Image (cartoon, grey):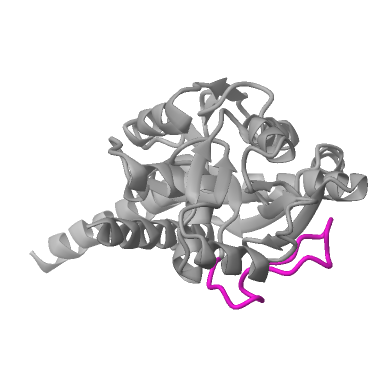
């Protein structure tokens, strides 16, 4: 009887060991979809195609970028959240669809429905005003907003987006009330600023550098840390406002995706970011690589999400 028990235990351990080895050796056997919630040609799409192209030679199966635009990226996010967690469906996340929109309106998913694979890049956000507006510093903005509550207007790339939320978080920190004017994208919002229709907006560091050199804007502050393209421009946190928001891009998978699949994906995408091809195309596309592990990416998104939720909660309480 004891010999039989030992045999059963030994067989069980051997089976468990074999299963463990098999699990650790997860390898994709069919194409992997990288879903983008926006149309081809935009920043999110560029990130998807950059990382897919750089990583393709490291995968035994095709990496297929699939655009599913609509509802500020939430249609794609919902689709991936509900997909089977088998390692074959990923979402380019980290921006408005992940950290901002779900706090402004009801969505059929939350951050808990995803697990991070890797952060690929981040894009600083820069608060600017028109050159002749007299708003040549954050102090000037806060002073005028306090003197004339509800009169300063800021333009954003659309309601519920990360630019909209960044102004809400800043407004909460500064104790000021401003009017939101949404546009269909960042370019129309900048055009509105230059045309004198709004007082402030948020643009990328590259656009800020170009407009600053042209003498059309005042560059006031970044909403996270200092940006390489405009190193002399302070961050809001340096100026005393606890704001740390940026437009991140990375890959996430459904929450049910097993550890071994996530590990496989993370390792290969991380190696892709180290290649000359990735670096060259990123530089040419004005993309700022910013690697984080999947777990670190989750934490970064959660931190931003919490900040947006706090700002909206305060706004609701003030309205009541």
Q: Position of residue 219 (x, y in %)?
A: 76, 57
Q: Position of residue 60 (x, y in %)?
A: 63, 30
Query: Going by the picture, which residue comes out furthest to the front?
Result: 147
Left or right: 187 in relation to 209: left
Left or right: 109 in relation to 68: left
Q: Position of residue 223 (x, y in %)?
A: 62, 61
| Residue 156 or residue 116, whichever sits in front | 156
Left or right: 209 in relation to 20: right
Q: Look at the image and give the residue range highlighted in magenta.
A: 225-243
Q: Residue at x 69, y 54 (%)?
A: 126
Quadrant housing the N terminus: bottom left
- Is residue 227 highlighted in magenta? yes
Main SS type for the magenta part? loop
| Residue 300 or residue 144, whichever sits in front | 144
Q: Position of residue 152 (x, y in %)?
A: 55, 52
Q: Residue at x 36, y 37 (%)?
A: 85
- Is residue 231 highlighted in magenta? yes
Query: Going by the picture, which residue comes out furthest to the left?
Result: 1
| Residue 170 or residue 125, whichever sits in front | 170
The answer to whether any part of residue 226 appears in the image is yes
- The quadrant holding residue 78 is top left
Q: Residue at x 52, y 32 (%)?
A: 28
Q: Residue at x 68, y 30 (%)?
A: 49
């Amino acid at each position: 009887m004891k010999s039989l028990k030992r045999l059963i235990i030994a067989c069980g351990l051997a089976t468990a060991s074999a299963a463990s080895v098999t699990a650790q050796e997860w390898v994709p056997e069919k194409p992997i979809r990288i879903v983008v919630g926006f149309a081809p040609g935009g920043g999110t799409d560029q990130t998807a195609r950059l990382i897919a192209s750089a990583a393709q030679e490291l995968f035994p199966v095709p990496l297929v970028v699939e655009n599913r635009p609509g509802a500020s990226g939430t249609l794609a996010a919902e689709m991936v959240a509900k997909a089977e967690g088998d390692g074959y469906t990923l979402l380019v996340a980290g921006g408005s669809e992940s950290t901002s929109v779900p706090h402004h309106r009801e969505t059929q998913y939350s951050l808990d429905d995803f697990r991070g694979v890797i952060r690929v890049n981040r894009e600083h956000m820069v608060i600017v005003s028109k050159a002749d507006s007299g708003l040549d510093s954050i102090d000037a903005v806060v002073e005028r907003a306090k003197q004339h509550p509800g009169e300063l207007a800021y333009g954003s790339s659309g309601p519920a987006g990360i630019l909209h939320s960044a102004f809400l978080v800043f407004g909460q920190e500064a104790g000021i009330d401003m009017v939101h004017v949404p546009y269909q994208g960042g370019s129309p919002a900048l055009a509105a600023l230059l045309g004198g229709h709004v007082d402030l907006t948020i643009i990328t560091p590259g656009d800020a550098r170009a407009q600053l050199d042209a003498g059309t804007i005042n560059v006031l502050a970044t909403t996270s840390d200092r940006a390489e393209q405009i190193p002399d421009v302070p961050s809001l946190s340096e100026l005393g406002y606890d704001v740390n928001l940026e437009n991140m891009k990375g890959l996430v998978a459904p929450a049910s995706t097993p550890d071994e699949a996530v590990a496989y994906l993370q390792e290969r995408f991380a190696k892709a970011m180290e290649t000359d091809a990735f670096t060259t195309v990123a530089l040419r596309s004005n993309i700022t690589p910013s690697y984080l592990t999947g777990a670190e990416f989750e934490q970064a998104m959660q931190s931003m999400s919490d900040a947006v939720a706090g700002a909206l909660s305060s706004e609701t309480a003030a309205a009541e």
